[in-house]
């Protein structure tokens, strides 16, 4: 028996989830895919650490989660809170959108996502600042 690294398992799971997206996820994806939202790039069913995010914008470090009715159960609420905290400590903001809102107010949801991305501060620079030179 060969060992599959966790990363490979997560990617395979993400691929399966892309094939089995819910109707609200599909409708939202049609609006934000291929840089249709003001040139902003989103990924769908994107693995990060132990989680797979419904949608992720790397430039804004924003996760967009479409939550169905099951997310209102106490156990799911606790899991979502833990997941959000884990992502927040890594500099990723989480925007939770009820699936019913996607179905009934898609344009408003897309506007909300656009505002969130636009208002998100840029991610911190990686590495030291460039040396100060003489002009």
Image (tube, helix red, strand yellow):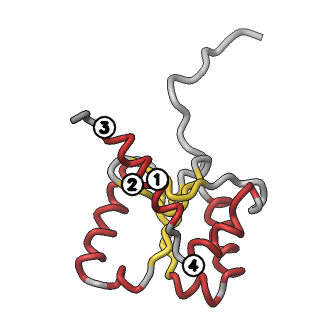
Nearest to N terminus: mark 1 or mark 4: 4
Q: Name the quadrant containing residue 77.
A: bottom left
Q: Position of residue 71 (x, y in %)?
A: 36, 79
Q: Position of residue 107 (x, y in %)?
A: 72, 80
Answer above or below: position of 122 versus 98.
above
Nearest to N terminus: mark 2 or mark 3: 3
Residue occupying image coordinates x 44% and y 47%: 11
Circle 2 is placed at which residue position?
A: 87
Cα–Cα gap, marks 3 and 4? 32 Å
Circle 1 is placed at which residue position?
A: 92
Disc 1 to disc 4: CB gap under 8 Å? no
Mark 1, Cα crowd under 10 Å, few <14 / some 14-19 / many 20+, is some
Disc 4 to disc 2: CB gap under 8 Å? no
Cα–Cα gap, marks 1 and 3? 27 Å
Circle 3 is placed at which residue position?
A: 4
Label 1 vs label 4, nearer the camera: 4
Secondary element under disc 2, as helix, strand or loop, is helix
Q: Name the quadrant containing residue 69.
A: bottom left
Residue occupying image coordinates x 61% and y 72%: 26
Query: Going by the image, does 13 lie left or right of 133?
Result: left
User: Can you name the residue that lies furthest to the top here?
Assistant: 134
Can you tell which mark lies on residue 52? none
Nearest to N terminus: mark 4 or mark 2: 4
């Amino acid at each position: 028996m060969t060992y599959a690294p966790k990363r490979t398992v997560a990617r395979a799971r993400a691929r399966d989830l892309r094939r089995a997206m819910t109707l609200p996820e599909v409708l939202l994806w049609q609006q934000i895919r291929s840089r249709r939202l003001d040139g902003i790039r989103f990924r769908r069913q994107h693995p990060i650490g132990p989680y797979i995010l419904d949608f992720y914008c790397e430039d804004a470090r924003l996760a967009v989660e479409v939550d169905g009715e099951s997310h209102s159960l106490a156990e799911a609420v606790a899991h979502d809170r833990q997941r959000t905290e884990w992502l927040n400590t890594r500099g990723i903001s989480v925007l939770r959108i009820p699936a019913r809102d996607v179905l009934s107010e898609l344009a408003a949801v897309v506007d909300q996502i656009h505002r969130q991305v636009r208002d998100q501060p840029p991610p911190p620079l990686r590495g030291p600042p460039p040396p100060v030179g003489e002009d």
